[in-house]
Image (cartoon, rainbow, N blue to C red):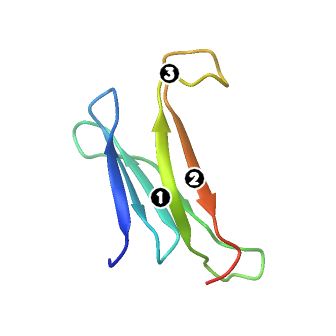
Amino acid sequence: MSEGLFALLPDGGVMVEEENFGCLLITDRDDNVKARFINRAENGEVYRLGGSRVIAPCPANRTSSPCIIFQAHPEK
């Protein structure tokens, strides 16, 4: 991993973004993987991510659950 970031979630979990390989990972406080996203196009190519952020509480779903916002790059 050469570029990326992480954020602590309100429930004690962690969001990790690995920018170069287009991967976003969310764990709970016990390091169990709760969600994984790979920025893969229909042609099978994997593209970068950048600037992922956690917004809590999430205004879109009107709950206390956090939103994960990310930018998917269309190029490698």
Numbered disc 1: secondary structure = strand
Q: Amino acid at mark 2?
A: Phe
Numbered disc 2: secondary structure = strand
The first of marks 3 and 2 along the sequence is: 3
Across and down, in percent, residue 13 comes to 30, 38
Q: Are marks 1 and 2 in contact (CB under 8 Å)?
A: yes
Left or right for 51, reference 75: left
Work out whether 45 lies above or below 52: below
Q: Nearer the viewer, residue 35 or 60?
A: 60
Name the disc covering residue 70, or none: 2
The first of marks 1 and 3 along the sequence is: 1
The Cα–Cα distance between marks 3 and 2, rounded to whole angstroms, is 16 Å
> Which residue is found at the position 32% from the left and 27% from the top?
11
Left or right for 27, reference 69: left
Across and down, in percent, residue 27 comes to 34, 45
User: Mark 1 — residue?
Assistant: 24
Q: Amino acid at mark 1?
A: Leu
Q: Nearer the viewer, residue 39 or 69?
A: 69
Q: Amino acid at mark 3?
A: Pro
User: Mark 3 — residue?
Assistant: 57
Across and down, in percent, residue 20 comes to 47, 77
The first of marks 1 and 2 along the sequence is: 1
Work out whether 35 lies above or below 66: below
- Residue density around tag 2, few if under 14, some if 14–19, many if 20 or more, within 10 Å: some
